[in-house]
Amino acid sequence: MLWLTLCLSAAAKPAPLPHPPLEETAARLIGAALASPRAWEQLEVLCDDIGHRLAGSAALDRAVAWGLEAMRSDGLQARTEPVSVPVWVRGAESGAIVSPSPTPLHLLALGRSVPTPPGGLQAEVVVVSSFDALAALGESQIRGKIVVYDVPFTTYGETVKYRWSGASEAAKYGAVAVLVRSVTPESLQSPHTGSMGYAEGVTPIPAAAISVEDALTLRRLAARGPVTVRLSLESRVAPDAPSANVIGEVRGRSAPDEVVVVGCHLDSWDVGQGAQDDGAGCVMAMAAGRLIAALPVPPRRTVRVVLFTNEESGLAGGRAYAAAHENERHVALLEADTGAGAPLGWRVEPGGSDDDLRAALAPLAPLAALLAPLGAGALEAAGSGADIGPTVALGFPGLGLMNDMAPYWRIHHTEADTLDKIDPMLLRRNVAVVAATTWWWAEVETPPVLTP
Amino acid sequence: MLWLTLCLSAAAKPAPLPHPPLEETAARLIGAALASPRAWEQLEVLCDDIGHRLAGSAALDRAVAWGLEAMRSDGLQARTEPVSVPVWVRGAESGAIVSPSPTPLHLLALGRSVPTPPGGLQAEVVVVSSFDALAALGESQIRGKIVVYDVPFTTYGETVKYRWSGASEAAKYGAVAVLVRSVTPESLQSPHTGSMGYAEGVTPIPAAAISVEDALTLRRLAARGPVTVRLSLESRVAPDAPSANVIGEVRGRSAPDEVVVVGCHLDSWDVGQGAQDDGAGCVMAMAAGRLIAALPVPPRRTVRVVLFTNEESGLAGGRAYAAAHENERHVALLEADTGAGAPLGWRVEPGGSDDDLRAALAPLAPLAALLAPLGAGALEAAGSGADIGPTVALGFPGLGLMNDMAPYWRIHHTEADTLDKIDPMLLRRNVAVVAATTWWWAEVETPPVLTP
């Protein structure tokens, strides 16, 4: 019966399929991505059923469980990797102009801000539009006051520094609190929260984002006379909490120890639904894994979807991943964390001089050619992504999905970051770009070395 | 000494100046309007020092006093005319999705809504997108529920009917409350309040506007299963309060009993600053009066600036004016109440058939020619304005300033109707249009009769 057994074995295990060319499979993935409503359906569950999910919240725990289960049912080998995350709780908060005319302020405490003293604080404001203007006023005009940073949005990089460092800079001159104009080009009385930090050695003072409208009102009023503001923030820090990165893999067929990471962050700020930031990126990364897992032949290398935890309020997930996986061969790390506007291409790092960059990006021309029909053929040397950052810093190539950001800033870190802001068809197009790019890195015969 | 006395008299009273042609003075007014920051400065005081000003509020009383004083110091003969206004007080309000996922709603009670029972109410929602859909569901599916009107913005006329009549229509089928998607094409979680009414004979049920985002979330959730919402409105009606229309005049030089009214409404909803609705219109009307009062020769007819009270929550000011002045000869009534976007021209009523309209509008061609260089040469047969409406209904020509409304709807009746939304240069251009038009009607030799 040996012969029969052999025959049955042969029938049960068909001969390996030939590998279609890289481009043929990429085209197939793009077609499948554009046709599938599944990423949207997953995002609907994440937004409407789970909602916003700051580190330390029960909602983030539910999101971790959901991501694990979703990737398993999508055919990936999924697991969690524990991460201890810092916990900051907003608590009740309010503020108002007390004089000359009592008017409520529209504010959100900045993430990790210390609270005000119990009962709140009240002080005159001083309005500045730069750190230079702050320094020019000096301690004599700042001590005991609330500093209002009324800095119009130019680029994120230029204006976010007031959110991040504004409290520390003002504290140096004896300010009792800071109110930071929200980092956005547009506003409908919408405060934008976000992370901040305290420099070593300064007294930590409370910090809140106010709406653009309120910043402008304070500026106008202060130009005409003294303005007093009341502020109450009941934020608190709780002990670190257990959380997890969620990881789903498609094991490589011939070089399983070479890894392509496609990532996003699963946490969000504690307002809105975290639809754009970064629920959309998560369902793109998950879709890339799902579509590649569904191919008849797995890619040469391992594809690893990583839903990072705690990007917004600490980056513990990105750091934990780098520490746990520093010795693995990362061929590339991709991240999607700039919303779901029209995909434009990829930001690629590491960079260097302009000539270096041209040389470094040249090997990616075939990838750009695959994506160009989707409007996403651009390659730009720039920072890739926060979550993959600690691993990219170890010397691996990092790529950040580049989107049309026009719709992004207006809802960034606000109550208005909700599912309705995500265009389902643009989401599909983003999925196509992320899936095809992930595939390309996992299948290309010789992965480019991008270091100049 | 008789001769000397006569001489002195002659010196003290110079010979009347010749009257420059109508167009020459119009050009002078336009130039002065474009050069003057005064309307903006007045709007800053109204917005920042007085703030929003609903009928019955202390702020509206301050606005009345301010308007009177401002017009006097601008050289107009100013007075107030008492008006008794209805008083509705918002009180505390809140709402939330209770299940499937607890989520706060972003809402504002609609003006004149009844409160919920003490402690609020809780019920399942039913989401509809038209009155037809409501009727199709019928009492069996509506009784005891909260009706959510999720009607996308098309035109104000098409969608505002759900705000105005939604409660009455739903009450017919036994609904316990209504939540109305805000009447706006754009949203950043911003609820838009506004007036509503109860039809005769129906049980008045509580009514609130919710943000577009919340309406869409409720729709999505309800498509997947039962959704329960909690609503608490502590609104109340107080006894009518004394208020006033504020009137400032430039007496006509030869036909003082013929009157050109240029109006706006001084009250606002109880959110934001009432900058666009209708602070901007008020400083335009006041500027028209001021600029005409500053001319060396007054116009043929009397120019009457009217700051109407209580447009938003009752129209008592417009009705009181019509009753008090019904026997006067109104040559035309102008109103500015569509914000301070680029001025486009005038809506003119009464109308009629298309041919009637062409004939009716023809005599206004010289006026349109004056305004065309400002981009405001359009004339359209349409409703003119709410405040002047009761007087126009007596048979007088009504004209409503027509503006680019793109920036208008997004902040209409919201917390975001603030001074920063008004472009100071566009405000000047609007002042120029309103002042020149007011002058034209007050000076033109034979005022056109617009009735078809």
Image (tube, coloured by chain):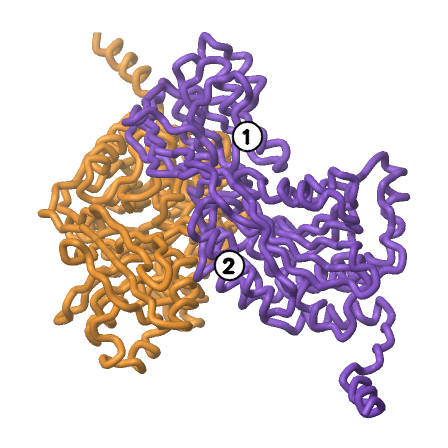
Chain colours: A orange, B purple
Q: Residues within 10 Å of mark 1 (few under 14, many from 20)?
A: many
Label 2 to label 1: alpha-carbon separation: 32 Å
A445 or B232, which is in the foreground? B232
Asked whether residue A439 appears in the rendered view, the answer is no
Side of A190 relative to B180 (left or right)? left
Asked whether residue B451 appears in the rendered view, the answer is yes
Side of B204 relative to B289 (left or right)? left
Q: Give the residue displayed 29% in from the left and 46% down from the top.
A: A269
* Above or below, B246 relative to B178: below
- Residue A322: give x, y in percent of width and height: 19, 52
Q: Which residue is mark 1?
A: B164
Q: Give the residue displayed 42% in from the left and 62% down from the top.
A: A217
Picture quadrant of residue A121: bottom left
Dot 2 or dot 1: first in sequence order is: 2
Side of A1 relative to B72 (left or right)? left
- Residue A443: give x, y in percent of width and height: 37, 43
Chain bearing mark 1: B
Side of A96 relative to B359 (left or right)? left
B89 or B2, which is in the foreground? B2
Q: Residue furthest front?
A: B1
Q: Which residue is mark 2?
A: B65
Q: Amino acid under label 2?
A: Ala
- Residue B401: give x, y in percent of width and height: 70, 51
